Amino acid sequence: MTGLSDLKIKTACENCHVRKLCLPTSLEGEEIQLMNDVVSDRIQLEKGDYLYNSGDSFKGIYAIKGGSLKTSGVTAEGDEQITGFHLDGEIVGLDAIDDDQHPCDAIALASTEVCLLPFDRLCDASGKAPNLLKDLTRVMSREIRREEHVLMLLGTATAEQRIARFLLNLYERLQKRGAQHNQISLQMSRQDIGNYLGLAFETVSRQFRSLQDLGLIKVERRNIEIIEMNKLSALSE
Amino acid sequence: MTGLSDLKIKTACENCHVRKLCLPTSLEGEEIQLMNDVVSDRIQLEKGDYLYNSGDSFKGIYAIKGGSLKTSGVTAEGDEQITGFHLDGEIVGLDAIDDDQHPCDAIALASTEVCLLPFDRLCDASGKAPNLLKDLTRVMSREIRREEHVLMLLGTATAEQRIARFLLNLYERLQKRGAQHNQISLQMSRQDIGNYLGLAFETVSRQFRSLQDLGLIKVERRNIEIIEMNKLSALSE
DNA sequence: TTTTTTACTTGATTTATGTCAAGGTCCAAA
DNA sequence: TTTGGACCTTGACATAAATCAAGTAAAAAA
């Protein structure tokens, strides 16, 4: 099923446009070839497709080559709780390593392409390349810190602060990926944003409106323009 | 400063009473010796002592040999947000790997002893022992999942659900450490619990009282007895 | 095109929880 | 033993955000 030419395309980590944001950020020259051998598969998803479901057995972690995903768990009461939005260059599935099954769903927010990094291969390669081991632990550490930030947000912040920080965080990440200046293109619904931030979707809508009335942002469906970055930033604190 | 006999005591991972809960859970025989060489130091803390402060440079991760810690970050507004309570056998400091400085404080809740695992040594050893590498990634994955659970709690749960889940979670972890049946000994203040769960401390107090009035628990200062485990569990969902 | 569905906005009302305030209890230091 | 202070409980009141409800706009389907 997989020809030689496919393999070549599949394994071109060194040519990947998100290379510097992805897992093997510190690998150079021959080491990056190791990484090519780790990547077993590319998966193409359309909007709404599941990359994995809660309960699925763990094969490996996934690097997002293009597009975006949301990850969500199911609360004890049975409803969805979104735990993160993930952009290209970011890694999902790290929470499944411990007990060999995914505790969350991962769902594409748009057309999305991911690389499967089978975990056994990744461990083998990490044993050979100390830099890869460091990159792996760094990526996991970053995910822990990301969740700590969300946690701190949900612990105390007001609805306005949550929305402001959400927008600023997304903006920073989009900027690294070369987005247009001061523009945020939301890939998710108000429902999703509210769910993620622990707010009703009506509250998200009202806060967008309120920030627009204050002249800090301009809202046009799922496109947000940041007008007053400093004020928005001040308000988020 | 460190004699041979000290070294022997320091490095006795194989004899440690929290060995099965700690990092090197899958190591056997000679491999566990590798771990002994990783541990560089034991640190004794009294209640209120800081293990590290936010901003401190990262030396390594810490395994709790006995006692307990809280970790807390500082929000943008400048107030404390507790991100976790950590018991013996658990690991703290994983969030500092990525950018080489601690993003949180870690503070002892009681007399506490920790082992310092310098990160470079740990990486070296992980390169030699594939099982150690797996243990390390498992511990990090577990921390990611733990935070996801808190996140899901803060996203939607009511005050009553938060308290119920907090108690049940703590109970499970204490049971693994041989606590008395149905007893929870809280090492932290109502203030801390509220901060962690995103509630005012008065709300924590009221919920304890309410659960006691329902006959599900018995509260006596910082000792909680679970009377109706099933009902408490049902209520937490 | 028209119709249907989904996503979003806005208003009115309710409610869970925060805030303020007062008093009580236990522990530690003198 | 007394005293001071941290910690906790309880009540009264305020409020941010949820919920309920109705309408609008855009996208998808017919």
Image (cartoon, coloured by chain):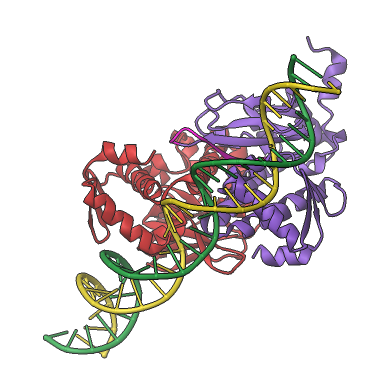
Chain colours: A purple, B red, C yellow, D green
In magenta, the rendered stretch is A76-85
Q: Is residue A124 left or right of residue B68?
A: right
Residue B194, magenta (yes or no): no
As for residue A79 lying within the magenta part, the answer is yes
In-front residue for pair B117/A167: A167
Q: Position of residue A142 (x, y in %)?
A: 65, 48
Q: Is residue B56 left or right of residue A1?
A: left
On the image, which quarter does residue D8 sit in?
bottom left
Taking the image as drawn, is residue B134 in sight? no
Q: Quadrant of residue A185?
A: top right
Outermost residue, top direction? A1
Q: Residue at x 34, y 48 (%)?
A: B167
B9 or A171, which is in the foreground? A171
**Prevailing secondary structure class for the magenta stretch in the rendered image:** strand
The relative height of residue B125 versus residue B74 in the rendered view (above or below) is above
Q: Position of residue C23 (x, y in %)?
A: 24, 77
Decide which of B64, B159 is in the foreground and name it: B159
Q: Is residue A68 visible?
A: yes
Q: Is residue B235 above or below residue C4?
A: below
